[in-house]
Amino acid sequence: MGADAKTKNVLLVGVGGQGTILASKLLTLGLMEEGYDVKMSEIHGMSQRGGSVSSQVRYGKEVWSPVIERGSADMIVSFEKMEALRWLEYLKKDGKIVVNNHEMMPMPVIMGKAEYAADIADEIKKSCDNVTIINATEEAMKLGNGKVMNIILLGTIIKTMGLEDIDWDKIVKENVKPAFVEDNLKAIRVGMSLI
């Protein structure tokens, strides 16, 4: 466990089916292996239908609550652009946000009851000084497996939060089906390289 025992808050947000839950579970397992006290909570908003999904991961020496309060997230990782905007109020003043430059139309937009905002990246940059926009979906396709986009985003958390010393290879090997281990290990490294 690092010298800084203060509780850290990481919020992973996305749309159902993007793999936010797997990424947060791997993050939690890695943190626990390193000796942190970790609390994780998940919110599934109609996740099967492209609804909003979030995972909150809090870790430190002693963590009492799994819930991240508004304005207290050290980092937000958004698997989809609009979700970044939706959860922005949870970010600390000096917090960091990583946004996957990917659009998934939510049900209200598909049904014509809402519009997908055109200038999401600009809106985020107005509210936050430390914004990194990456093309995790494209990077996953380059690896030959679009499904590892979530693990690329996990790599961005590892790098941003200074968690490189944890044995992520071991965590992946123990928790991912053998056929997908290599792709996932490559994806973590790609994610780390994008920060």
Image (cartoon, helix red, strand yellow):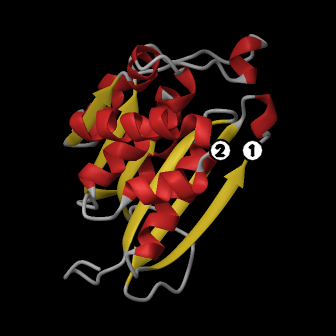
Q: How many marks?
A: 2
Q: Residues within 10 Å of mark 2 (few under 14, many from 20)?
A: many
- Residue 152, above or below 42: above
Rendering coords of residue 49 (x, y %): 80, 29
Say which residue label 2 marks. 53
Dot 2 and dot 1 residues touching (CB under 8 Å): yes
Q: Mark 2 is on which residue type?
A: Val
Of residues 40 and 131, the one drawn nearer to the viewer in this rendering: 40
- Residue 49, above or below 20: above
Which mark sits nearer the N-terminus, 2 or 1?
1
Tell me if 147 is positioned left or right of 184 in this view. Answer: right
| Quarter holding residue 30 | bottom left
Q: Is the C terminus in the top left, top right, bottom left or bottom right quadrant?
A: top left
Tell me if 48 is positioned left or right of 66 in this view. Answer: right
Identify the residue at image location x=74%, y=44%. 45
Rendering coords of residue 173 (x, y %): 51, 52
Identify the residue at image location x=29%, y=81%. 6
Residue 31 seen anywhere in this rendered image of the structure: yes
